[in-house]
Image: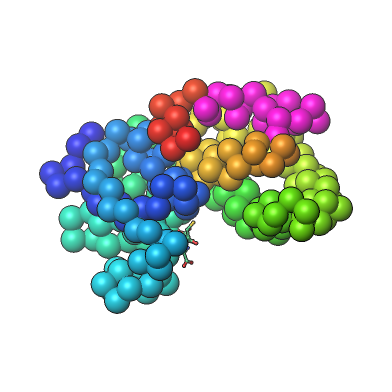
Amino acid sequence: MSTEKPIKLYDFTTSPNCQRVKVVLGEKKLPFETIPIDLRKGEQKKADFLKLNPYGKVPVVIDGETVLYESCIINEYLEEKYPNPPLMPKDQAKKARIRILIDYGLNHLDPPYQKIRMELMKEEKERNQEAIENSKRELNNLLQRLEREMGNQPYLAGDFSLLDAAVIPRFLRMEGFRVLPDPSLPNLGKWLQRMKDRPSVKAIM
Ligand SMILES: N[C@@H](CCC(=O)N[C@@H](CS)C(=O)NCC(=O)O)C(=O)O
């Protein structure tokens, strides 16, 4: 489906929050124009940008007259405005389940994920290896729930959905952290490979 005026995305290439929006734009084949915002230069805190997003963060999407921020809210908007292909089930209970798992995958996994990320940003000799190993164990424990709930379905909640789009940027990083693939998480390992084969995910890698 195409829009009259292309959607504008204020983007920082390596931002996971921008990447999850780009996956949904890609899945829905919506043309979009990228406006790069250099976070290292603090462009997200400039007055003009703050008029679009008072939080001073990317992504921001402009669709016609509509200005949006907060990646998961943007994705819900895209799903409602551009329903084909559908990335959410029609059934309210299934939809709510997906939202619970999006919250789980982003918020509940956040503390150990951020701990590892912060440690790996340090010089190797400065890193707290014990804290990294503890956080990896913690992440593995938290991931067991997704592993179980997914079972042998192709995607985290059955069909490809906003859940897969929401969490994939972090899971790609977790692969870099060597949290995945892991023999105790076989379903997630196969899912990750399946995700990496999708053009919308290839485009953010
Ligand atoms: N909850 C927001 C978080 C957005 C966010 O934290 N974006 C980061 C990039 S990944 C950012 O713009 N950081 C710059 C800053 O905080 O100054 C969302 O989901 O869109």
| Residue 189 occupies quadrant | top right
Residue at 45% across / 30% down in the picture?
202
Instruction: Tell me if I can see residue 35 in this picture.
Output: yes
Residue at 18% across / 55% down in the picture?
64
Residue 190 in magenta? yes
Q: Position of residue 49 (x, y in %)?
A: 30, 69
| 144 left or right of 113 in image | right
Residue at 24% across / 46% down in the picture?
33
The foreground one among 162 and 52 is 52
Residue at 13% across / 44% down in the picture?
4
Residue 6 against residue 48 in the figure, above or below: above
Q: Position of residue 192 (x, y in %)?
A: 60, 29
Instruction: Tell me if I can see residue 112 in this picture.
Output: no
The foreground one among 98 and 120 is 120
| Residue 121 occupies quadrant | bottom right
Q: Image quadrant for the N terminus?
A: top left
Q: Position of residue 16 (x, y in %)?
A: 50, 49
Q: Position of residue 51 (x, y in %)?
A: 28, 73
Residue 92 in magenta? no
| Residue 151 occupies quadrant | top right
Residue 89 against residue 123 in the figure, above or below: above
Residues drawn in magenta? 180-196
* Applied colour scheme: rainbow
Q: Residue furthest left?
A: 4
Per the picture, the main secondary structure of the magenta-coloured stretch is helix
The foreground one among 107 and 203 is 203
Q: Looking at the image, how many numbered discs can be counted on the residues?
A: 0
